[in-house]
Image (cartoon, rainbow, N blue to C red):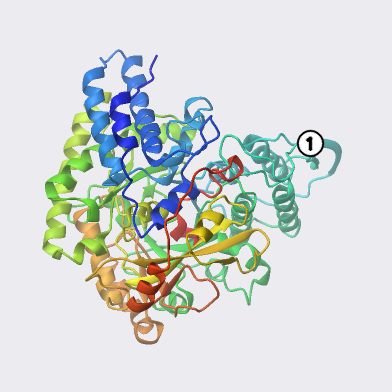
Amino acid sequence: MSIFTLNESFINEYSKKVPPFGFNGLGELVYLRTYSRLKQNGENEQWFETVQRVVEGTYSIQKKHIESLHLGWDPEQAQISAQEMYQRMFEMKFLPPGRGLWSMGTDIVNKKGLGASLNNCGFVSTKDIRINFAKPFLFTMDMSMLGVGIGFDTKGEGKIIIQNPPMNDQTYCIEDSREGWVNSLGVLLDSYQNGFKPIFDYNLIRPIGVPLKTFGGVSSGPGPLIELHEKVRDILDKNIGFPITVTTIVDIMNLIGKCVVSGNLRRTALISFGEKESTEFMDLKDYSKNPQRMEYGWTSNNSIFAELGMDYTEIAKRISINGEPGLAWLDNMRNYSRMCESPDNKDYRVMGGNPCLEQSLEHHELCNLNENFLNRAESKADFLRTLKFSYLYSKTVTLVNTHCAETNRVQLRNRRIGCSVTGVAQFLSKNSLHELNDWLKDGYDTVKEWDTIYSEWFCIPKSIKMTSVKPSGTVSLLAGATPGMHFPESRFYIRRMRLAHNSPLVQPLKDAGYVIEPCVGSETTTVVVEIPIDVGEGIRTVNDVSMWEQLSLAANMQRWWADNQVSCTITFKPETEGQHIASALDYFQYQLKGVSFLPKCDFGAYPQMPYEEITEEVYNTKRASLGKLVINKMSEESSGEIFCDGDSCVKII
């Protein structure tokens, strides 16, 4: 048997320890809401059990791989190594991505063989839709339903003519499964090329409210899928007889994203890439010109493929209004690893990136990431030691095949991973930039050394690239870390978090004195809880840091740490900095691989914003009013109700 287990006596020691959740209880709330799975006895995991499941799942994958190739598994050494990984995870010196916390060591991977669910994000090109119209859309829907955020391009523009499908009396019965939903979209799309217009039967799909055993949450019923079919039909019917357009490609992808989110199947994120010359692409989120897109255009960030030396004037004008489009420099993505090194052209096959743009990706490639928390490291030596285990987690994930042949071919060749650092702003509040760079440079060399050692041990290729800076989402909240390289909105603030109105967390929160109110716009199904936060003394906020300094920090991280990319959303003040965006892009185009911008808006710009700045006095008053949060058990219906490690990509709280 290729099952690895940690020693029971070792686990018993940690069962008595208090987890070091961050941000005044917010970390624990996020964990219970998002990553604590339901056990067979009907109770939810505690932190020590989640870490146990993830570590045992990781080492079981290693054991299976080593034993299948007869390479010699050493159980004693494995136990020592696994215990140290466990300890560093429990203390939150590093953590797998949200996908790993949720799926690793479960039947999703072990029995259903859905290794893709361990990956954060992927990319698919529409360049070959002349050969297979439906394929890129089905890849997006399939992976999105597994929690994988997807980037896609619009290179299929004009490559096919939308045909008028003849009517058909045959009925297509949709299976009640992920595959059934995906296949039904394929049947619909294919009908506009070489088939008959199908009549769908939705009767097999579970009604709304039925628990979903594998992924958690409850069924949405067939409603979101029906809407997807109707909207896609409407869009394609209007394009019959014409070449497929940029708008049509992005519309279908966005509708897929809306279906996945509203279907309670999984939170996901999308990014669309367009050509810099395409006014049509640029205007997609101008809802005065495309009012019909308002209901689904929000499901993707939109970025252009920028070219070195281009004129950024017109792009900058658009960015200064609402922050879009973002920019991705394919030349830099393909030609460079870290920007401090000479061009190596090792990623010449790259065609795009993931929704938060911390990973360069090929067509059909996925990426798996992890986070190393600088604010949790006791010293540089401690940080370097932690990198061994964060690296090993992600390298192990590359041993797991997906259910997609094209993806497996890329994954097996590239073994791309993303060891990320987070809590950069907190580190800089106590240390110099020179010290940060010292950690980053030595850290990168350490990851390279471990890649040589473990690639030889696993008998697989070295990873084409290994490091990145992800924007982080809920995982950084667990550890009380500022996300990625970004600065916080303020030192003291209220962080608002959404919960299902019937969540078993609601009453304990009320009993402990937390402010809870109905969610504006979803009053009957969702509530919002307020948590007062202090990110720490001496930390600088976005009010203190200029657009230029943020760009310089991103370039610094791209130079010394990330051989993949740095996910950076640059907050700018429209009234004073908006006019300088073109100059900034002209200067930093040689130092970055991708960037996005966000106009700074005032707190309270709309109801129940995720962050609301408060004074230290208000913070202390609110903190003093809170009692102890006591949570005994969570119900099966709420387990895993919301899951996404990319909150910052899609602005979902």
**Residue placed farthest to the right in the image?**
169
Residue in front for this viewpoint, 628 or 232: 628
- Residue 185 position, x and y percent, is 68, 43
For mark 1, give the secondary structure: strand
Left or right for 274, reference 249: left
Tell whether 603 sits left or right of 243. left
Q: Amino acid at mark 1?
A: Tyr
Image quarter in which the N terminus is found: top left
Residue at image position (46%, 68%) is 325
In this view of the protein, can residue 161 be seen by the observer? Answer: yes
Taking the image as shown, residue 147 lies to the left or right of residue 84, namely right
Q: Residue at x 39, y 71 (%)?
A: 493
Residue 590 appears anywhere in the view: no
**Which residue is denoted by mark 1 in the rendering?**
172
Q: Which residue sits furthest bottom?
A: 575
x, y (%) of residue 5?
Answer: 35, 23
Instruction: Give coordinates of residue 340: x percent, y percent.
Output: 17, 56
> Within 10 angstroms of label 1, few (less than 14), some, or many (20 or more) residues?
few
Q: Is residue 645 above or below residue 581?
A: above
In the image, 511 versus 60, the foreground residue is 511
- At x 58%, y 74%, the residue is 286
The location of residue 142, given as percent across then percent down, is: 57, 41
> Residue 24 lies in what quarter of the image?
bottom left
User: In the figure, 595 relative to 20: above or below?
Assistant: below
Residue 28 or residue 244, whichever sits in front:
28
Q: Quadrant of residue 636?
A: top right
Looking at the picture, does residue 320 appear above or below residue 477? below
